[in-house]
């Protein structure tokens, strides 16, 4: 009878301790969360932490151009190089004055099908 009571006390103590514990500030395996945390760290003046977080994010998800651009910008800033140029978005298409022509209602293939159904082959 003593063993279960001791286990219950231990479990209750662990639950009380866990209830007061704070969750980690970010997920260490989520590249987007790492990027956001790195941006906050850089904004707060902690460039070393920002560099470590961005390098980890790039290792996890190297295809994300935004994370790679942030890492390159931070490296350039630390080395005293000018900020790398970001590609400009393509220009917006010119506004049309008239709407485009609507598509044909009955394509040629469907006309042939209707004619076959009615017995009038083309």
Image (spheres, rainbow, N blue to C red):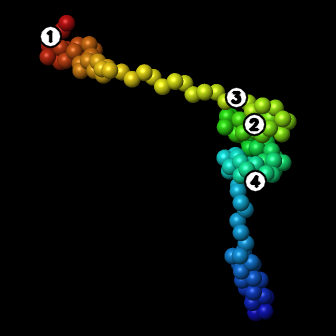
Q: How crowded is the residue under tag 4: few (<14 C-alpha within 10 Å), some, or many (20+)?
A: few
Q: How crowded is the residue under tag 2: few (<14 C-alpha within 10 Å), some, or many (20+)?
A: some
Q: Residue at x 67, y 30 (%)?
A: 86
- Left or right: 112 as drawn, with respect to 56: left
Which callout, 1 or 4, points at the residue further toward the start of the chain? Answer: 4
Q: Which mark is residue 44?
A: 4
Quadrant assignment for the C terminus: top left
Question: From mark 4 to mark 2, how far is it between C-alphas?
Answer: 16 Å
Question: From mark 3 to mark 4, how far is it between C-alphas?
Answer: 24 Å
Which callout, 2 or 3, points at the residue further toward the start of the chain? Answer: 2
Residue 14 is at least partly visible in this image: yes
Residue 62 is at least partly visible in this image: no
Q: Marks 1 and 2: in contact by CB < 8 Å?
A: no
- Could you say whether the residue bearing mark 3 is in a helix, strand or loop? loop
- Could you say whether the residue bearing mark 1 is in a helix, strand or loop? loop
Q: Marks 1 and 3: in contact by CB < 8 Å?
A: no
Quadrant assignment for the N terminus: bottom right
Question: From mark 1 to mark 4, how far is it between C-alphas?
Answer: 79 Å
Which callout, 2 or 1, points at the residue further toward the start of the chain? Answer: 2
- Could you say whether the residue bearing mark 2 is in a helix, strand or loop? helix
The residue identified by callout 3 is 85
Which is nearer the eye, 114 or 10? 10
Which callout, 3 or 1, points at the residue further toward the start of the chain? Answer: 3
Image x and y of residue 77, in percent: 80, 38
The residue identified by callout 2 is 73
Image x and y of residue 57, in percent: 74, 44
């Amino acid at each position: 009878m003593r063993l279960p009571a001791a286990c219950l006390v231990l479990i209750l103590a662990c639950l009380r301790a866990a209830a007061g514990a704070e969750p980690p500030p970010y997920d260490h395996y989520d590249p987007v969360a790492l990027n956001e945390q790195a941006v906050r760290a850089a904004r707060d003046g902690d460039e070393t932490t920002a560099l470590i977080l961005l390098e980890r994010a790039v290792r996890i998800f190297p295809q994300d151009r935004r994370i790679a651009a942030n890492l390159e910008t931070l490296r350039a800033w630390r080395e005293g190089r000018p900020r790398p140029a970001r590609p400009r978005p393509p220009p917006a298409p010119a506004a049309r004055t008239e709407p485009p022509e609507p598509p044909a209602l009955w394509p040629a293939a469907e006309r042939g099908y209707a004619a076959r159904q009615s017995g009038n082959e083309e």
